[in-house]
Image: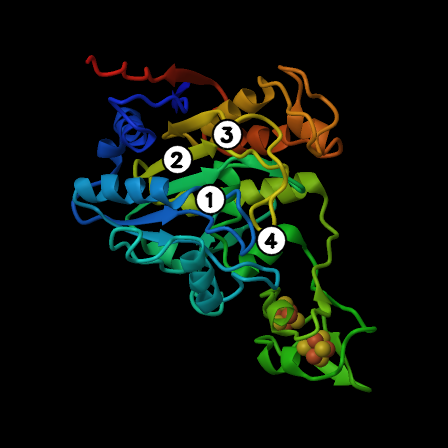
Amino acid sequence: MTADVFFMDLTATSRENLIQKLARLMIKAGIKDVLSEKDLTAVKIHFGEQGNTSYIRPIYIREVIRSARDLGANPFLTDANTLYVGTRSDALSHIKTAIENGFSYSSMDGAPVIIADGIRGKSETAVPVDQKNCKEVYIGSEIVDADALISVAHFKGHELAGFGGTLKNVGMGSASRRGKLDQHSNVSPKIKRKTCIGCGECAAHCPGSAIYLEEKKAFINKELCIGCGECIVRCPTESVKINWNQTVPVFLEKMMEYSLGVLKDKTDKTLFINFITRVAPKCDCLPYSESPIVNDIGVVISRDPVAIDQASADLVNGQQGLPHTVLTDNLGPGQDKFRGLYPDVDWEHQLEYAEKIGLGTRKYSLKKMKTLSYKKG
Ligand code: SF4
Ligand code: SF4
């Protein structure tokens, strides 16, 4: 089976600007078949960490909102809180960051920002998936409860996954804090004794009563820890750290199993959009952005989450790498830019595994949308 991936480049003319072109691409890709009247539609994006400048420009997201609303749907913008301490680790700071980065109720044409896993990242739904690594996955409840999902991902490099696109936006991005910790690690967090000041904040908020204090230092009882990640964001001295004991292939497989959980029960109610623009070497979770590794390429849309990421990776790898960036290997057209950035990360494993568990297909047909010619006169 081959999936269609619809592509627009970034050429605009007096007959059609890029916002209008995006609207036309969404129609070509079948948004009308995905959304129905009154569908509560989660538009899953990444608002960007404060200081990051690579995330998708809000004016494009507003067009996604408007296109959904034109079909009678009720869209809202969403993302789940982060596992790490930053400017998006609870719903209040997350919404503040979203507003500061340009995603507000007024700028988004009346679509609210609703954080998928609630004010403290605890509003989660356990979704059974019964896969090799995860029997159930923990997803932000607002995404589970939505009637439809439009994932809008910024396609770029990623330190752990090789690249981040649709599958990462869906699988990791929709997971609650517990779900994120579950994907990153299979053991409890650890406490840095050197910096722990014994304040007891972590213990006071641990739902498993797994933390105890001895001689003004915190300790975690692994038997009681349920892996919720609450202690990580509660610690005022950032002394609680993730135990990065998981291998990259298992991390990627879990992320795909989480994607499966997110998309479960949304058959025919999903659309995936990748912006292959400002292809930074690292994640938008960083509070800065490095120079893009290739020139801006365009936007792709598909109903298949695997095909769209495969097509996006191929489009990036088909480019000439730009000079004066952190990419110093594999710069030639056709060379693997993600391996050039992260030689030890087998990024293809996420696509192979996603295909294996039935998320979609790596075989795709790229449908290039024509640019409308200039108006005469
Ligand atoms: S991860 Fe959750 S359950 Fe485990 S020690 Fe931290 S707060 Fe407690
Ligand atoms: S919250 Fe942090 S500093 Fe306070 S006791 Fe726990 S680990 Fe130590």
Q: Are marks 1 and 4 in contact (CB under 8 Å)?
A: no
Displayed-image quarter of ligand 1: bottom right
Marks 4 and 3, Cα distance to the nearest angstrom? 25 Å
- Residue 90 - label: none
Secondary structure state at the residue bearing disc 3: helix
Identity, as a three-letter code, of the amino acid under mark 2:
Phe
Mark 1 and mark 4: Cα distance apart in space: 21 Å
Mark 4, residue position: 287
Between the C-alphas of marks 1 and 2, the distance is 9 Å
Count residues near mark 2 (Cα–Cα under 10 Å), then give few for <14, some for 14-19, many for 20+: many
- Position in image of residue 141 (x %, y %): 39, 59
Q: For the N terminus, which image quadrant?
A: top left
Which amino acid does the dot numbered 4 rest on?
Answer: Pro
* Residue on which disc 3 sits: 309
Residue with the mark numbered 2? 272
In the image, residue 242 lies at what x, y percent?
70, 60
Q: Amino acid at mark 1?
A: Val
